[in-house]
Image (spheres, coloured by chain):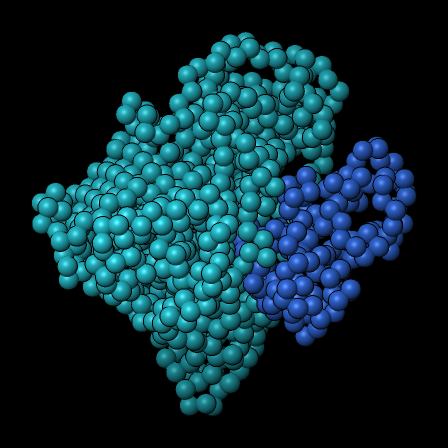
Amino acid sequence: MRLSVNGGEHVLDTPVGTSLAHVLREELGLTGTKIACNEGHCGACTVQVDGVPRLSCITLAHAVDGDVTTIEGLREHPLVEAFVRADAVQCGYCTPGQVVSAAALVAANPQPTREEIRHAMAGNICRCGTYPKIEEAILSWQG
Amino acid sequence: MARLIRTEKEVEGRFEEVWIVVEEDPLEQWPAGPLAVVGRPAPRKDGPERIRGEARYTADIKLPGMLHAAVLRSPHAHAKVGRIDLAPALALPGVRAAIGPGEANGLEEEAGFAGAPVAAVAADSFAQARAAVEAIEVDWEELEVVLDPDAAVERELLTDEPRRSERGDVERALVEADVVVEATYRTQTVLHNSLETHQAVCEWLGDTLHVYISTQFIWGIRQEIAETLGLPEDKIRVVCEFMGGGFGSKNSPDEYTYVAAELAKRTGRPVRCALTRREEHTSAGNRNATIQRLRAGARSDGTIVALAGEFTNSVGWSGWSAPTEGPMRMLYACDNVRTVTYGAQLNTPPMKAFRAPGFAEGTFGLECLIDDLAARLDVDPLELRRRNYADSNEGTPFSSKNLEECYRLAEKHWERRHEVRAGSDAVWKRGVGMASQIWYGGGGPPSYAWVRLGSHGRATVITAMQDIGTGTRTAMAQIAAEELGLPLEHVEVVLGDSDRGPYASISAGSSTTPSMGPAVRAAAADTRRQVIEIAAQRYHLEERVLDIRDGMVVSADGNLSAPVEEVVGLLEEAQILGKGARGPNPTGMSVLTFGVHVVEVAVDVETGEVRVERVAAIHDVGRIVNPLGASSQVEGGVIQGIGHTLSEARLLDPETGRVLTTSLDAYRMPTIADVPEIACEFVDRPDEHLTNLGSKGLGEPPIVPVAAAIANAIRDATGAEVHELPISREEMLRALREADARAREKEKRGAPAAV
């Protein structure tokens, strides 16, 4: 199996039926992608495939047909600094997934309104309740 | 100097008398208000690591040769293992060991709830362990299932002795009252749902057990494992550098830790035991449901003369009976108060502390009842609360109480109600409600910290505490930076490892900042003193004229201004080490937190949909160390509170006792789309009697008044009285119909209809 992740090509001997999240975390050591429900309900495992947010815990690795971007590929994105400034992080377990979703949003729509942010981010659960700060971070991501 | 004292220790409303050694050097509190670093907003020091996905959680720990464990859980709410055969599991590929009832703490023959741990397997992969667990053969003897809390109380199936309190003569006061109100309130079972599930990785190195665990209490884990396994405490190392949420559910080791430790021992390899999300919903603890049968009596001038409550906590198979009666006993001045609290033992999953256990539930009942009373007396709800202001906690003076100031700050939000109501139309009714908050949060000793200052002029706070996501690292760095006179960027915090720092407090009961902050300040002061001593000798000046500000050692006359690193540099590569301890809480005083929320809601009277549109949250928790982090705590508490009030409910099959809501699509937590405008304010006055810092905790207070304030806003908007959480559309429509019938009844009797 071939997998393109954050601009690097990987040839892997992964059993059919393995989730993309499992491959990223266990085989490639990319533990920034978190698994919190492992059934596609919470958004913690969000990655991008060709720029589109995808729940990696319910995506079969063999079915991936594009370039995967994980939080490790977005570490220099201005959103990271915006999240820090706005205090859009508490326990931080959902946060990489939040940043990946937000990066897809601002790539498609650099100046989203509050409503657009709420629509795009509603699939990423944060149990600590950092939502107001996430909204703030995305509104001010360009500094 | 070390002093041995006898003191009262409180965590989440549970008190115990303990001997403690305090080595505190008394320090004057800093003046109130923002200082150089403390009291000013600071982004989290560990923000970049967490946000960039670099922070290593227990879930990310991967040790060489690590095996994965899975747990067999009871499908029955109450049953006994007749025969169990592990052999079919052991025969499967990848399986390295299997254990049954009695072979690890927590694995038991009698399963008291559906989801109780019974047996466990370690295998090369988690999938193999899961498959093996399914292969274990068990013959179950099913036992009687008790699910009804009232029946359990009647049959005296209780987890705790009934808790009774009484002051004055309640029955007489009720007879003499001008107005008496009475209502029954019910709250539901809710799940913590920390995004990182409960888990541990255990590894034996020689005779030392290394435990990597997602926990709120490193030292409690160490002590409990030592006691259970009969090991000396220093043969256990507990590590938790980052953890993905706990909210009260991660204070103890539990079966997954003991399973990992035992399987690691048997296999000679490290073992991970991590709960799945579905196990998290059946077996990892919950906020228990309650039934609250309440009465209140008042004179026509608004003086509350009697409060009476019978509380039933549906504790479940295990857990403890939380102080649901606390708000009734403590929030108002009232001469006649009687409460009784039962903890019903049921064949349901266990209770675990959840953000202000008891008080979040009890405040819903009490503060709804107070608004009921206000309506009957035709007194403004804010005015009624002020008229019954408590000046002591059942006779014990408060170390500080600024609830009146909270009420004053609430006025501008409360005054919006006329305008808000005017925004109603035929379908959407709008209104404003309030509720007060009382809770513990004073923290306590013992807690210790070290502060190390290197020759480069940078300091490290070292203490074996945990940062559960509340911004602890940042708050502790701010306190040390303030005392040392260093910029915040020059202070780091090392925590999360029992082998790398002194004993530190639990992060529960809103105690982290009030317990740890004073110890960190004391350690920083010890370090600072040593720097001044060295500088005095080096520059031939008296110590009393020297100070450290902004990273510079300065003299009072301004002639000396030397960078700290120039002074500490005299040590070459060596370091100064300061030590600090947390002193005792003030004797004979109640240390409590206070607040008030004012909530605006809109109710669709046709569908029963409730939308929270605005929350003003005002809290009095002493000195605020980091206003930015504090506002995040408040927003988080409010949002969890909205979930508890409107959408979250763990449902059981009423016949079998099995959890029906095992996934996050069935159990509905708030998303970003459910969040209202949240305005957050603090009184920010140091508690002059509490430690060298004057700070109380803030984790729990913001969840306490949310449900009652929402329910009271619904009453204001529609006249409907909700009595049950969650306020589902069904409950909302029931309350609307009831209000309608009440209004018609009144009309029929000739009285003017309620407006």
Chain A: give its colour: blue
Quick one: quadrant of the C terminus of chain B? bottom left
Can residue A81 be seen in the rendering of this structure? Answer: no
| Count of residue discs | 0
Give how far across and how far down residue B201 sits, in percent.
61, 36
Q: Is residue B23 left or right of residue B59?
A: left
The vertical placement of B127 against A97, above or below, is: above
- Image point 25% across, 39% down: which residue? B310
Give the image location of residue B239, x and y in percent.
56, 44
Q: Nearer the viewer, residue B306 or B403?
A: B306
Is B348 situated above or below B91?
below
Q: Position of residue B335 (x, y in %)?
A: 14, 52
The one of B536 and B236 positioned closer to us in this rendering: B236
Q: Which quarter of the rendered picture does the N terminus of chain B lie within?
A: bottom left
Taking B736 as reference, is A29 left or right? right
In the picture, one chain is cyan; tell me its letter.
Answer: B
Q: Does B715 appear above or below B456? A: above
Q: Indicate the position of residue B554 as horizontal and vertical percent values.
A: 47, 83
B485 and B728: which one is in front?
B728
Q: Nearer the viewer, residue A129 or B383?
A: B383
**Which residue does the image show at 84% across and 35% down from the upper left?**
A14
Q: Is residue B79 visible?
A: yes
Please tell me which residue is depicted at 12% across the width and 51% down the height of the picture: B177
Taking B377 as reference, is B542 left or right? right
Residue in view at x 32 percent, y 29 percent = B150
A129 over A1 or under it: above or below? below
Determine whether, in the image, residue B319 is placed left or right of residue B49: left
